[in-house]
Image: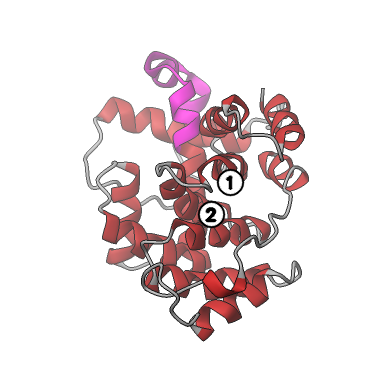
C-alpha cells in the first residue's frame, strides 16, 4: 500500500478523519482489496485490544514468546504507541490468531446469515439531481440502481454507487444503498465507512442503516460496535422490518 492509503486508514483509527478523507477512504476500500484487507485486520485487532488489560498482555509469557516472530508486517500508526501498549497490541494479535483451544466464532458468518436485501424504495423519477427539484435523473444513477436491483451483481452495484455518492455527497440515501451493496458483496470494512455517516444523520434511512452497519461491524470483526449498533436498531421504534434478523445476530454475538 502507498503512503496515502496508510494515512487514511491511520486517521480513521485515530478519529482524525475529515469528511473529505472519509469519502476518499470509502472509495479506496470499495476498489482496493489490499487496503480493505488491511482495514479489516486492524479493526479485528483493535476489537481484541479493547477487551484486554495491559498487565495481562505484558505478563503473559506465552504471548512474549509469540512475539519473537511476528505473524505479519505491521505499519505503525502515526500517533506513537508507548512500549507497553505496543506489547499489548502484538500480544493480542498472536492470541487472536493462534489460540487453538477456543476458536473464535465466525463473525462473518453471523453477518452473512442475517443479511437481508433492502429493496430499492426510491421512485425512479426522484433518484438524482444536485437538488430536490424535478431535474432529470442522471443516467449514472439509473444505471447504478439497475445493478442494485439485481441481487447477483452487488459488486458492480457497489462500484457504480461509489461514483454516484462521490457526485452527490449530500444525499445519504445513495450512501445507504451503497453500504447495503458492499455488505451484500462481503466488503465489510468498506460498508462500515459507507454506512456510518447515514446513522449520524436525521434521515429516513438512519434506522435501517443501524441494522446494516451492525452487520458490517460484525463482518469486519468488531464485536463490540456490532452489538451496540444492532441494539440501537432494536431500541428504535422504527426498527421493525429486520427486528428478527437483528435480534438473531445480537444473540449470536453475545
Which residue matches tag 2? Answer: 191
* Quarter in which the C terminus is drawn: top right
Q: Is residue 119 visible to us here?
A: yes
Which numbered disc flags the more N-terminal residue, 2 or 1?
Answer: 2
Residue 154 percent coordinates (x, y): 67, 67
Classify residue 102 as left or right of residue 236.
right
Residue 144 percent coordinates (x, y): 58, 76
Q: Is residue 66 visible to us here?
A: no
Classify residue 185 as left or right of residue 55.
right
Label 1 crowding class (10 Å Cα cut-off): few <14, some 14-19, many 20+? many
- Residue beneath the point at 62% across and 45% down: 219
Q: From what the image shows, is residue 166 above or below residue 57?
A: below
- Residue beneath the point at 64% across and 30% down: 99
- Tell me where residue 187 sits by quadrant: bottom right
Residue 242 falls within the magenta-colored stretch = no
The answer for how far apart the CA atoms under marks 2 and 1 are is: 6 Å
Majority secondary structure of magenta residues: helix
Nearest the eye: 172 or 58: 172
Nearest the eye: 34 or 223: 223
Q: Please say if the residues under marks 2 and 1 sit with CB atoms less than 8 Å apart.
A: yes
Label 2 crowding class (10 Å Cα cut-off): few <14, some 14-19, many 20+? many
Residue 53 falls within the magenta-colored stretch = yes
Q: Residue furthest front?
A: 134
Kindly state the secondary structure of the residue where label 1 is placed. Answer: helix
Amino acid at each position: 500500500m502507498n503512503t496515502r492509503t496508510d494515512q487514511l486508514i491511520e486517521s480513521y483509527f485515530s478519529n482524525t478523519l475529515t469528511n473529505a478523507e472519509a469519502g476518499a477512504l470509502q472509495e479506496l476500500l470499495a476498489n482496493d482489496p489490499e487496503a480493505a484487507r488491511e482495514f479489516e485486520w486492524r479493526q479485528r485487532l483493535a476489537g481484541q485490544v479493547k477487551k484486554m488489560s495491559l498487565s495481562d498482555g505484558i505478563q503473559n509469557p506465552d504471548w512474549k514468546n509469540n512475539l519473537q516472530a511476528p505473524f505479519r508486517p505491521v505499519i505503525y500508526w502515526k500517533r506513537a504507541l508507548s512500549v507497553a501498549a505496543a506489547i499489548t497490541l502484538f500480544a493480542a494479535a498472536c492470541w487472536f490468531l493462534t489460540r487453538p483451544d477456543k476458536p473464535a466464532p465466525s463473525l462473518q458468518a453471523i453477518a452473512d446469515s442475517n443479511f437481508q436485501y433492502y429493496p430499492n424504495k426510491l421512485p425512479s423519477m426522484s433518484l438524482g439531481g444536485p437538488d430536490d427539484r424535478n431535474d432529470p435523473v442522471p443516467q449514472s444513477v439509473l444505471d447504478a440502481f439497475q445493478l442494485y436491483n439485481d441481487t447477483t451483481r452487488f459488486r458492480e452495484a457497489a462500484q457504480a454507487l461509489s461514483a454516484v455518492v462521490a457526485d452527490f455527497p449530500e444525499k445519504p440515501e445513495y450512501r445507504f444503498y451503497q453500504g447495503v451493496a458492499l455488505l451484500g458483496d462481503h466488503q465489510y470494512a468498506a460498508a462500515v465507512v459507507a454506512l456510518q455517516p447515514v446513522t449520524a444523520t436525521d434521515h429516513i434511512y438512519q434506522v435501517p442503516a443501524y441494522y446494516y452497519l451492525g452487520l458490517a461491524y460484525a463482518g469486519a470483526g468488531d464485536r463490540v460496535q456490532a452489538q451496540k449498533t444492532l441494539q440501537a436498531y432494536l431500541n428504535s421504534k422504527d426498527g421493525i422490518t429486520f427486528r428478527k434478523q437483528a435480534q438473531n445476530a445480537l444473540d449470536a454475538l453475545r
